[in-house]
Image (spheres, helix red, strand yellow):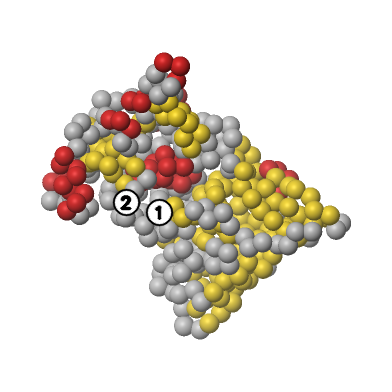
Amino acid sequence: MRSTRNIGIALASTLLFAGCYEGAAQHGDIESRFVVGNASKINTFVVNSSKLGAFNINGVRFGVINGVKWSVINGVKFGTGYNINGTRLDSVTIDGADYTDFQVEGSTLVGTVLQNGEEVELSGTEMIGTVFGLTIASVDEEGNDVEVQAEIRIDDVYPDPNAYDDDVMAYQLSTREVGGEWSSPCLDFGGEAQPAIVLSNYWDTETGDRIDDPTVFTFACTTGVLAHCTEWGYRPWAEAELCKNGKKGKKGKKCETVQLTDHHQACTRMARADYCGNGEPWTVDGTHLDIWDNLSPQIQERAFDWVVEAEWTPDGAYCLNDIRQQGWKAEGLYPSCGKKWDKHNKTVKNCGSLKKNRALLVSSFEP
């Protein structure tokens, strides 16, 4: 029998949130090919090998339990100012049986559970009813140390109806204080419950960097760009062909197969207008955006003759032609990513061309 290994979980709600972009020509109708930027802070609900946070930021509430507001900054600090002293993952069960192991295959959570003394592998709908038991050591509003017993439950698992690709699974989740009422941790602006997508690894809540850790997986609410970028086709576990100048040479000799992990990360930078790749967003609600890539075939195709904004890499903008928030520019607000980057940006020609695959994505904004 295998021993239970440390399990890391992250739940990203408005993490890297940028709204309701529906995809490009082949990933949704052109009328809805927009990013509605929110410029919210990076928020995550994290259990990283025994650390946990939660959230109550920008009007999206995970829960208020015994006067303790759950608000996440990567399991280290409450966004409302409360510090987390420590959290532990006590149990993961289904119908009273204990899980001994977890892994993520694509966007599907796979668990090994003990049933009648034998290990059985469960996945997909077989995991409905799984409950994660947690103890959160925190500080209440009066400064007293408290322990909160909480639970996360998987209520449903189904193919994500908003994803172009049929390998993206959606997880409907509920959370509660033990003995309390269940409620969804993933809410849209109308207060309606939304599902989450399971992703390997987790994301730094300050910088937006992906942290590669095989012991951690993330429940990314579909109200945020971690999920959006997955739904738009940039599934971090998938592969695609990247060819010289975006075109196949004879017999495909000038092409290579790449994993879309970096495209997904570049997409999260793009959606939040995180030009400097430091986690600082430069977008607001209501911003329309068009994006495309240089893959073969393209996942996202250009649809409008709009003003090129930037080329994007996992570390932010490779080059910046102009910012999408022209009102800020008129007020004298413009991002500076440091002298070295500013000098580099001035030397880049034809920003938006993805010349020699120097970047992964391009964005343009409605003039």
Give the left or right position of residue 165, taking residue 17 as reference.
Answer: right
Q: What residue type is labelled 2?
A: Gly
Q: Residue 294's spot in the image, x, y percent?
A: 37, 29
* Residue highlighted by disc 1: 209
Relative vertical location of residue 115 with respect to residue 71 in this rendering, above or below: above
Extreme top residue here?
250
- Say whether residue 279 is visible: yes
* Residue highlighted by disc 2: 277
Q: Which residue is drawn at 20% across and 54% down?
A: 338
Q: Which residue is drawn at 41% across and 69% down?
A: 80
| 2 or 1: tag closer to the N-terminus | 1
Mark 1 element type: loop
Q: Residue 335's spot in the image, x, y percent?
A: 21, 51
Quadrant containing the N terminus in the rendered view: bottom right
Numbered disc total: 2
Relative vertical location of residue 111 with respect to residue 27 in this rendering, above or below: below
Where residue 268 sits, quadrant-wise, is top left
Extreme right residue here?
116
The answer to whether the residues at label 2 and label 1 have Cβ atoms under 8 Å apart is no
Q: Which residue is drawn at 49% across and 69% down?
A: 69
Quadrant containing the C terminus in the rendered view: top left
Residue 63 disc label: none
**Closer to us: 189 or 239:** 239
Q: Residue 215's spot in the image, x, y percent?
A: 58, 57
Give the left or right position of residue 185, taking residue 77 as reference.
Answer: right
Cα–Cα span, label 2 and label 1: 8 Å
Label 2 Cα neighbours within 10 Å, binned few <14 / some 14-19 / many ≥20 = many
Mark 2 element type: loop
Q: Residue at x 21, y 49 (%)?
A: 341
Relative vertical location of residue 358 with respect to residue 55 in this rendering, above or below: above
